[in-house]
Amino acid sequence: MLLEVKGLTKNFAGLIAVKSVDLHVKKGEILGLIGPNGAGKTTIFSMISGFLRPTKGDIFFKGQKITGLSPPRICHLGVTRTFQLVKPLTQLTVLENVMVGVFAKVTDTEGARKEAAKILEFTGQLHQKEVKAGSLPLGDRKRLEISRALGTRPDVLLLDECMSGLNPHEISEAIQLIGKIKENGVTLIVIEHVMKAIMSVSDRIVVINHGEKIMEGTPEQVANDPEVIKAYLGVDYAKR
């Protein structure tokens, strides 16, 4: 397994946010992570990426235990995340924002500039390279968040609701971009509430409810599971 989580648990002052979660992702796979708001999905991302230390459990990347390592160290090893609330460096240009990510692996400025430009061409934002990030609309900010993460040259990319708040056209573009990222050799774990999107991009889906894994399977299996329908999808979705 490229990334494996075993018995992951997180308590906050007696409140169990995540309880004994096991999950894994293989190289070249897209794993969807779904569940109601407050289910513990982002907390799992925060533990994998080093922003939170697990109360119990372990995280392995390429067979190496990375539990409790710092976010910069985990990023340098090859695991990068985006954030649900995008926060670009507003006074810097789009290109400069991506260069910040590139500097995780590249030391010279000119080399970072060239690599950032290649990433923006890949994500379809090269025409905005000189635009101040603070002036971008939400859809372009979300795409910039992905571009900056790609700058770190991740083996595993954790996408946290990169499609929330987007219109149907922007969602379609985001789905296409995720497919391109996978084709480029990056493995992904995706948190998303847009069911059309998560069902179409995922190879497998893990469902979290009240901090616990309640189901794992193909998109079709998950969409037809009675417990998942009751806890999250709802009867109306199941009838589609």
Image (tube, helix red, strand yellow):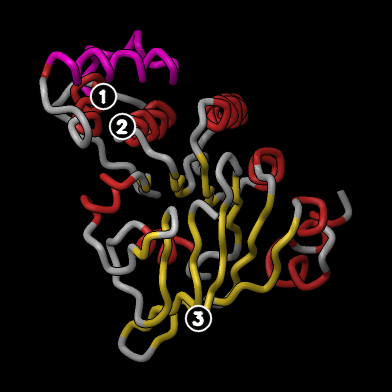
Image point 46% across, 75% down: which residue? 8
Q: Specify the amino acid type for callout 1.
A: Ser
Question: Is the Cβ of the residue at disc 2 closer than 8 Å to that at disc 3?
Answer: no
| Residue 3 screen position, x and y as percent | 48, 56
- Residue that extends furthest to the left in the rendered view of this protein: 108
Q: Specify the amino acid type for callout 2.
A: Arg
According to the picture, the residue beneath numbered tag 3 turns out to be: 19
Q: Which mark's residue is nearer the viewer, 3 or 1? A: 3
According to the picture, the residue beneath numbered tag 1 turns out to be: 135
Position above or below: 154 against 216: above
**How crowded is the residue under tag 3: few (<14 C-alpha within 10 Å), some, or many (20+)?**
many
According to the picture, the residue beneath numbered tag 2 turns out to be: 148
Q: Which mark's residue is nearer the viewer, 1 or 2? A: 2
Does 133 sit left or right of 30 as displayed?
left
Q: Nearer the viewer, residue 156 or 83?
A: 156
Instruction: Give the number of the disc on residue 97.
Output: none
Image point 38% across, 60% down: which residue? 64
Q: Secondary structure at mark 1?
A: helix
- Residue that extends furthest to the right in the rendered view of this protein: 239
Position above or below: 132 against 22: above
- Residue that extends furthest to the top in the rendered view of this protein: 127
